Image: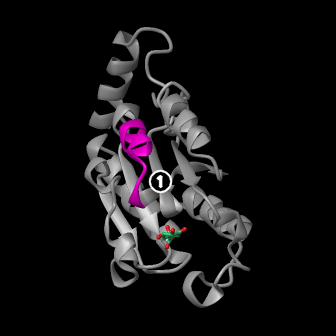
Amino acid sequence: MATKRVNQQAARHAPAGASKRRRSLEGATESFRILVLSGPNLQRLGKREPEIYGEQTLAQIHAELESLAAEHGARVDCRQSNYEGELVGWLGDAADAGFAGILINPGALTHYSYALHDAIKASGLPCVELHLSNPDAREEFRHTSVVAAVCVARVAGFGAGSYGLALLGLVESLKRSKGR
Ligand code: DQA
């Protein structure tokens, strides 16, 4: 009851359209929108080195992520690109497009793309780095992540499950930070 009153007061004092997540008249809360990005070669999941990356395709991972997000009060917009510049563009537009946070599997760009590092930082949004494999347990060049320092967390080594775990972690921390 008290919470409802506070929300009603907040709604009265907020300028029109100020909060995209303001409670609606029914008392429901708009879901968090999460941008999910996958980098080079991840369009080949299912066919690409299944002993390392598993048998699920990226389309299947995206479909499962959509259901999981819906169960947890979020919505995902899943995209893949082989081009660094396209990923940088999506990161740059994310905040203005109303996303609350980002999940990114940068693929091999993880290990050398300062452009992605800068774009994640400049997005101003909480971002989780994720990997299907555990890069630290693989070849030496995969032990460096140039994006880790601008991400709030990293999930790696759970196969396709890394996407879902990263989503749950991000949504939980968004809920905590927005007092939900
Ligand atoms: C990867 C790990 C990277 O080292 C690799 O270049 C990939 C996939 C992963 O999800 O395990 O393309 O990001």
Quarter of the image with the N terminus in it: top left
| Residue at 40% from the left image edge and 60% from the top image edge | 111
| Secondary structure found at label 1 | strand
Cβ of mark 1 under 8 Å from ligand 1: the answer is no
Magenta span has 115?
Answer: yes
- Is 100 drawn above or below residue 160 in the view shown? above
The spot of residue 137 in percent (x, y) is 35, 84
The amino acid sitting under disc 1 is Leu
Q: 50 and 176: which one is in front?
A: 50
Q: 112 and 103: which one is in front?
A: 112
Q: Is residue 25 left or right of residue 12?
A: right
Q: Is residue 163 left or right of residue 57?
A: left
- Is 18 drawn above or below residue 79 in the view shown? above
The spot of residue 6 in percent (x, y) is 29, 27
Question: Which segment did they paint magenta?
Answer: 111-120
Can see residue 23? no
| Residue at 48% from the left image edge and 9% from the top image edge | 16
Magenta span has 121?
Answer: no
Q: Which residue is mark 1?
A: 103
